Image (cartoon, rainbow, N blue to C red):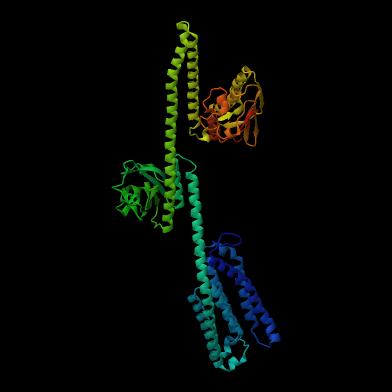
């Protein structure tokens, strides 16, 4: 409805009507005051004899109905379609008052006759060209009636500004003819101008309407995109698409059916607004459902009444469900048809071109979301298989290595070994230990690369999770003669993470610090900072060359200094650390100088309070 006193919005013509209604009311106070003023000033200053009492009654009538319009403005504006009726009623009452005033002030010879022009100009703005000419003709007929009265019954005319009109009757007809021509010319000129303005206004309004509709559709598609991308579960995606599609197209229900592997049947994927009995009516076979066959071929199909269209496979079931009209289109992604989407209405409805385009856009968006969800599901399955393979391989490799290790340890019980034999046994045991380390690191690497929903991770107390890691690192440092310093402030540090992941990160960093530090200290510090926990591991060990800093996080990479030190390693530890940290949403950085030690800084997000 209209924009009245800051309320709802009016169409341009309704807004114009409202403004004219308000303007008429304000101007009519002046018109009534003018009639009363003429009654007082006319006889005194113009020496004109006027019927004062009838004119005062006309002025009071104008004031009365104008007061009624003034008090009814809000009610008129709030009632649908009442503005135009109010304008026409005002013009009718004004013309009645105007005819009475002309009659009382001298008939056709009264200058008040020109007041009709005012209404004709306003009518050209608010009414059609035909209505304006009808108004002009009506004004001419009314004045013609007064002209005839002046000619044939001059005694009935109450007063006269121009005595010559009553003395020369033919002059009355001449005035009438002149006013008629003047009215027609005024109407022609006014409507010629306003007709073009109205056409431009209509075109502008249609453009604004189309732009508003396009904006709403874009917002709706954005909302659908946000919803379907908020989850990677296929069933949830399909349900969200169906629910929002029914809402966007004002439908009673929506259903998404996907092709099975054979491509001959459609099974229900997502739905909204349909009963379970209708969903269980039976499989939709593409050969028997011509509407689906046409849609799968790439067409957008609509049915006005499903009960009367032979292309629909289950008309009786649809009638019992209360479904009448259907709009259906294919869901395609990467030149592959995944299924069809249908929108149902409870009443006969012809879907316009804009609605068809909107459903096609939703279908394309939904097809991409389905493809993404399926791809994610396949990745999860592949990830599970990879984890299973890593664990199985770990078990299968450890068993023979453990047996070989046990056999080597048992050689001493078989009899004394020569020095050379002891050396060979020691080398074999070292190789087996290295193999065990390699297997453990490969298993950790596979675990660090697994796909995981961050929101589904448990809430972990970081301080509690680090206690066993710190204890083990302290024992290693003290056994090597190093100083182990703790600068920890982890009170209330909670984060979404698994305890094995946290242990994997900091056990690797602390073990490396102890392993590559010959003398000095290892420092382990942590403190919370603006929603993050900052943890650092610092040592006074051999350090890392500047050109190696960008490579140490690559799998199987070991620096030249590490290799030259004779310390064994797989080169997987830091690669595992970085992958786990990034999976948890954190970062890691390193600062180091050869011979002066190394510092690793880790930032991990804390759970919201």
Image spot of residue 272 (x, y percent): 42, 45
The answer, for residue 111, to whether it is visible in the render is yes
Up the image or down, 484 lies above or below 37; here it is: above
Task: Indicate the quadrant where residue 277 lies.
Answer: top left
The residue lying at 50 percent from left, 81 percent from top is: 137
The answer, for residue 604, to whether it is visible in the render is no
The residue lying at 58 percent from left, 32 percent from top is: 495
The residue lying at 58 percent from left, 70 percent from top is: 20
Front-most of residues 103 and 122:
122
Front-most of residues 135 and 327:
327
Front-most of residues 42 and 415:
415
The residue lying at 60 percent from left, 31 percent from top is: 545
Q: Is residue 396 left or right of residue 597?
A: left
Q: Is residue 113 left or right of residue 249?
A: right
- Quadrant in which the C terminus is drawn: top right
Q: Residue furthest bottom?
A: 168
Up the image or down, 217 lies above or below 420; here it is: below
Front-most of residues 32 and 320:
320
Image spot of residue 526 (x, y percent): 64, 29
Q: Residue furthest front?
A: 420
Q: Residue furthest top?
A: 415
Image spot of residue 543 (x, y percent): 62, 28
Image spot of residue 141 (x, y percent): 51, 83
Up the image or down, 136 lies above or below 299; here it is: below
Task: Indicate the quadrant where residue 355 lies.
Answer: bottom left
- Quadrant in which the N terminus is drawn: bottom right
């Amino acid at each position: 409805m209209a924009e009245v006193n800051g309320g709802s919005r009016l169409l341009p013509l309704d807004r114009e009507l409202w403004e004219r209604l308000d303007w008429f009311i304000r101007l009519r106070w002046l018109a009534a005051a003018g009639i009363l003023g003429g009654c007082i000033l006319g006889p005194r200053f113009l020496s004109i004899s006027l019927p004062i009492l009838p004119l005062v009654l006309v002025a009071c009538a104008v004031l009365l109905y104008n007061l009624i319009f003034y008090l009814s403005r809000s009610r008129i504006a709030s009632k649908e379609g009442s503005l135009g009726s109010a304008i026409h009623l005002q013009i009718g009452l004004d013309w009645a008052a105007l005819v009475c005033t002309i009659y009382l002030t001298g008939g056709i010879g009264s200058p008040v006759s020109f007041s009709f022009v005012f209404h004709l100009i306003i009518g050209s703005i608010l009414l059609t060209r035909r209505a304006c000419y009808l108004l002009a003709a009506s004004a001419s007929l009314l004045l013609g009636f007064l002209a005839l009265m002046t000619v044939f019954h001059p005694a009935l005319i109450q007063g006269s500004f121009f005595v010559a009109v009553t003395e020369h009757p033919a002059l009355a007809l001449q005035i009438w003819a002149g006013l008629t021509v003047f009215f027609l010319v005024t109407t022609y000129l006014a409507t010629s101008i306003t007709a073009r303005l109205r056409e431009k206004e209509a075109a502008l309004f249609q453009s604004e309407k189309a732009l508003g509709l396009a904006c709403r559709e874009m917002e709706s598609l954005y909302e659908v995109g946000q919803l379907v991308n908020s989850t990677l579960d296929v069933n949830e995606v399909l349900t969200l698409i169906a629910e929002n599609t029914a809402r966007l197209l004002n439908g009673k229900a929506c259903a998404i059916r996907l092709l099975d592997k054979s491509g001959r049947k459609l099974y229900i994927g997502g739905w909204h607004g349909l009963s379970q009995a209708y969903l269980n009516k039976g499989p939709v076979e593409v050969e028997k459902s011509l509407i689906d066959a046409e849609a799968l071929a790439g067409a957008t199909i609509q049915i006005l009444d499903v009960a009367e269209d032979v292309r629909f496979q289950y008309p009786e079931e649809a009638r019992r469900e209360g479904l009448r009209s259907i709009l259906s289109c294919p869901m395609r992604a990467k030149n592959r048809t995944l299924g069809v989407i249908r929108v149902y209405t409870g009443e006969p409805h012809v879907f316009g071109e804009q609605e068809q385009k909107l459903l096609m856009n939703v279908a394309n968006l939904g097809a991409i979301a389905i493809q993404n969800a399926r791809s994610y599901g396949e990745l999860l399955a592949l990830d599970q298989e990879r984890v299973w393979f890593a664990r199985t391989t770990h078990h299968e490799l450890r068993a023979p290595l453990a047996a070989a290790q046990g056999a080597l340890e048992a050689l001493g019980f078989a009899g004394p070994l020569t020095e050379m034999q002891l050396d060979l046994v020691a080398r074999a045991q070292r190789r087996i230990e290295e193999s065990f380390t390699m297997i453990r690191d490969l298993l950790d690497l596979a675990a660090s690369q697994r796909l995981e929903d961050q929101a589904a991770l448990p809430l972990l107390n970081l301080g509690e999770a680090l206690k066993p890691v710190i204890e083990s690192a302290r024992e290693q440092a003290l056994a090597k003669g190093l100083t182990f310093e703790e600068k920890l402030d982890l009170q209330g540090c909670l984060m979404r993470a698994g305890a094995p992941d946290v242990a994997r990160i900091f056990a690797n960093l602390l073990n490396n610090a102890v392993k590559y530090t010959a003398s000095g200290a290892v420092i382990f510090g942590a403190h919370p900072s603006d929603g993050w926990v900052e943890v650092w591991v610092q040592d006074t060990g051999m350090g890392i060359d500047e050109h190696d800093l960008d490579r140490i996080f690559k799998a199987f990479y070991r620096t030249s200094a590490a290799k030259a030190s004779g310390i064994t390693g797989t080169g997987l530890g830091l690669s595992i650390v970085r992958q786990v940290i990034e999976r948890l949403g954190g970062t890691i950085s390193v600062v180091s100088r050869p011979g002066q030690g190394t510092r690793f800084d880790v930032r991990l997000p804390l759970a919201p309070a």
